[in-house]
């Protein structure tokens, strides 16, 4: 019996490493890796809150590392980046605290709605990005973010509340929010997005660890292979079709949402 249990645990670990590798590739090219890795955590038997916490921590180092890639832009927008980071910390902390206080049964009822929300975000992200590119070609140079600092920080805090609670697709929400406030420089927006999401998920990870909700054997395995998947995808990005991958993410999201609606209701 003990050997059978060991084999089962090992196969779960193998499954998580494979899924995390693919999720890392998706995040590097099109985004949406959480729509694959979070249900996989549920599928191996983790509770919904443990699955969310483990998945969040597994994906966080890749987000943190991306700060280095945008450091030049972050330095140019130092003041705004600080405010966005503080908004991320506050919103993420509130969202993660609420998650830890949510009974597992209630959160499981929310899972299909959260997956549906994430799938809808990704479904609209493609048309919005095409609209953004057209707008960029026909409009004057980008507005400086300081002109709308208060409202941007407030909206960032609200979006980061969602990040702390669940978070899939929130990066696109931040980009969409910033374009509504007149920003058009994609490098600037990505820099501010990275700061906010990294801080929000970072404080959420800390609270999840202190709350004892991280399942470390799966977290560490997923963390390693997710980083490997991201590296492989970034090296072969030219051979991958982001639009096709994004469509696959949307279909996957709607399918998983339908499955969890059927299972939960």
Image (cartoon, rainbow, N blue to C red):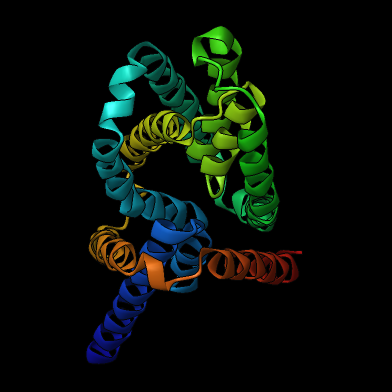
For the point 39% across and 35% down, which residue is it?
Answer: 194
Residue toward you, 163 or 69: 69
Residue toward you, 170 or 54: 170
For the point 31% across and 72% down, which residue is it?
Answer: 17
Q: Is residue 63 above or below residue 258?
A: above
Q: Quadrant of the N terminus?
A: bottom left
Q: Quadrant of the C terminus?
A: bottom right
Q: Position of residue 144 (x, y in %)?
A: 51, 14
Q: Position of residue 251 (x, y in %)?
A: 66, 70
Q: Is residue 253 above or below residue 97?
A: below
Q: Position of residue 104 (x, y in %)?
A: 55, 51
| Total tally of numbered discs in the picture | 0
For the point 53% across and 17% down, which residue is it?
Answer: 153
Specify whether 14 is left or right of 187. left
Q: Is residue 47 visible?
A: no
In the picture, residue 151 is in which quadrant?
Answer: top right
Q: Is residue 258 visible?
A: yes
Q: Position of residue 189 (x, y in %)?
A: 47, 31
For the point 68% across and 55% down, which residue is it?
Answer: 109
Residue toward you, 128 or 142: 142
């Amino acid at each position: 019996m003990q050997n059978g249990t060991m084999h089962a645990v090992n196969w779960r670990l193998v499954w998580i490493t494979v899924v995390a590798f693919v999720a890392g590739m998706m995040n590097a090219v099109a985004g949406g890796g959480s729509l694959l890795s979070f249900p996989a955590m549920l599928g191996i038997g983790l509770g919904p809150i443990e699955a969310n916490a483990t998945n969040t921590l597994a994906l966080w180092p890749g987000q943190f590392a991306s700060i280095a890639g945008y450091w030049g832009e972050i330095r140019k927008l130092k003041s705004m980046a600080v405010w966005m980071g503080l908004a991320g910390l506050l919103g993420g902390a509130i969202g993660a605290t609420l998650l830890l206080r949510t009974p597992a049964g209630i959160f499981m009822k929310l899972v299909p709605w959260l997956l549906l929300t994430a799938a809808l975000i990704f479904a609209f992200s493609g048309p919005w990005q095409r609209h953004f590119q057209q707008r960029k070609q026909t409009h004057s140079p980008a507005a400086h973010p300081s002109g709308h600092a208060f409202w941007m920080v407030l909206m960032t805090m609200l979006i980061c509340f969602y990040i702390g609670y669940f978070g899939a697709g929130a990066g696109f929400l931040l980009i969409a929010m910033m374009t509504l406030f007149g920003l058009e420089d994609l490098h600037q927006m990505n820099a501010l997005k990275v700061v906010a999401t990294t801080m929000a998920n970072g404080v959420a990870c800390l609270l999840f660890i202190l709350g004892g909700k991280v399942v470390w054997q799966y977290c560490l395995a997923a963390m390693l292979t997710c980083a490997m998947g991201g590296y492989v995808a970034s090296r072969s990005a030219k051979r991958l079709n982001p639009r096709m991958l994004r469509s696959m993410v949307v279909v996957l999201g709607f399918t998983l949402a339908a499955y969890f609606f059927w299972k939960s209701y």
